[in-house]
Amino acid sequence: MERHAVIEIGQDLITITHRPDTVFVSGQGAWLTDEGGKRHLDLVQGWAVNSLGHSPALITQALLAQSQRLLNPSPAYYNRPLLDLARRLVEVSCFDRVFLASSGAEANEGAVKLARRWGSRMRGGAHEIIGFEQAFHGRTLAMMSASGKPGWGDLYPPMPGGFVKARFNDLASVEHAMTPRTAAVMIELVQGEAGVVVADRGFVRELRALTAERGVLLIADEVQTGIGRCGHAFAYEHFGIEPDVMTLAKGMGGGVPLAALLCKEAFNCFLPGDQGGTFCGNPLMAAVGLAVVNEVCREEFLAGVRERAAQLSAGLQAIARDHGLVGERGLGLLRALVLPSDNANEVVAAAQALAPVGLLLNAPRPHLIRLMPALNISAAELNEGLALLRRALRQVLG
Ligand SMILES: *Cc1c(COP(=O)(O)O)cnc(C)c1O
């Protein structure tokens, strides 16, 4: 078919969402540059993916070195970066075993499979997974069922079954949902897509006790919260608990597709052939993950994240006071500013349109601005971001 003379941006893509007409061509640290040469301070960072900012030398060097050494010998064989990253993850976490994958949804699918395998072998066929209202676990069919996003339960019927919902921060509703069929409870310790809703510490500790007492697995979906994002290597540390199973993705790859499923030795129950994937454990991505984990999970680095988090929180509180907003919330460098009305999308657009430099923000809910800067953003860059945010808010809210 003949092409139109003028090619509109995105005309060749299957339509999945609304995007601004900006084409980004390069990124460095906290900054992105578009085709027109305009720079944007990026507080989205690929949805909390670029933990070390755009194109850090640590990652480009790991990619270059590994790409020249070995791309993929197949998951049927061991490779050195796979073994080294697994070892490092075991060292920095409370877990004993690791499976690498490429996306958060894929890691979560693995967690559900592991729970069902364990339920079928150890708990008389228990297979149900209790999740939470408003939760987000990814976009595969099963993870849409596992998520609690309104409308997702029947978007592509028939949806996979075996997923039950409880109310977040409500232990009685979890107890109510628990039956002999329950294999696991799956939770985001900070619900990201729901609007950066931090679980109550007491609730998480009681949930840990309840699941242990009932012999039900506790799966922490740390796809967004893990690897330094919340000021600790893992968010579960903040709550003073140890899950049985955990999933990681986003920030662990620092921008490349990499995910992990981790479990305690007692739940290492896949039989040969139960789980796999062509790209699972490929050395190219594992080499990047190793570089990221080595950098982020150092105590000095994590202390820096907590410092920037305190700065961001204080800055957002000041903005909320000055503009008469509801407030701010979050854990570490995963934070949200709560607006009094549903114009978060307007603020996002106004922020990106600022000149001479734009500001990139995310609005997971109509009244909410989410901020997920690079974990190594400088204090000066963060202050510049806060100043730009004030300008965008003044334009939209007056
Ligand atoms: C982003 C996210 C996922 C899905 O990860 P993908 O890599 O997009 O599949 C799952 N769980 C949580 C908590 C997330 O934030």
Image: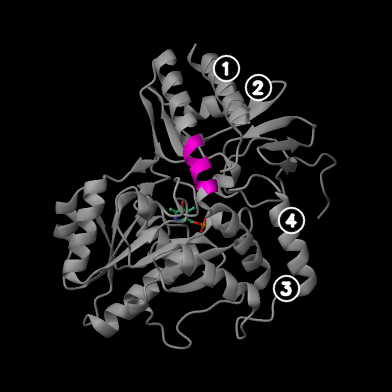
Label 3 or label 4, whichever lies nearer to me, is: 4
| Image location (x, y in percent) of residue 289 | 60, 62
Image position of 298 (left or right of 217):
right
Q: Name which residue lies at 43% across and 15% down.
A: 323
First along the sequence among labels 1 and 3: 3
Q: Quadrant of residue 94?
A: bottom left
| Disc sitting over residue 261 in the figure | none
Q: What secondary structure predominates along the stretch shown in magenta?
A: helix
Give the Cα separation between the discs numbered 4 and 2: 30 Å
Is label 4 in a helix, a strand or a loop? helix
For label 2, count other residues whose C-alpha is less than 10 Å away and answer few (under 14), some (14-19) or many (20+): some
Amino acid type indicated by mark 3: Leu
| Disc sitting over residue 71 in the figure | 3
First along the sequence among labels 3 and 4: 4
Q: Quadrant of residue 38?
A: top right
Amino acid type indicated by mark 2: Leu
Q: In terms of depth relative to the viewer, which is nearer, 290 or 316?
A: 290
Image position of 310 (left or right of 386):
left
First along the sequence among labels 4 and 2: 4
* Residue that carries the numbered disc 2 in the rendered image: 354
Q: Is mark 3 within 8 Å of ligand 1?
A: no
Amino acid type indicated by mark 1: Arg
For label 1, count other residues whose C-alpha is less than 10 Å away and answer few (under 14), some (14-19) or many (20+): some
| Scheme of colours in the image | one colour
Q: Is residue 264 rendered magenta in the image? A: no
Give the Cα separation between the discs numbered 2 and 3: 42 Å
* Residue that carries the numbered disc 4 in the rendered image: 60
Res 301 visible? yes
Label 2 or label 3, whichever lies nearer to me, is: 3
| Disc sitting over residue 391 in the figure | 1
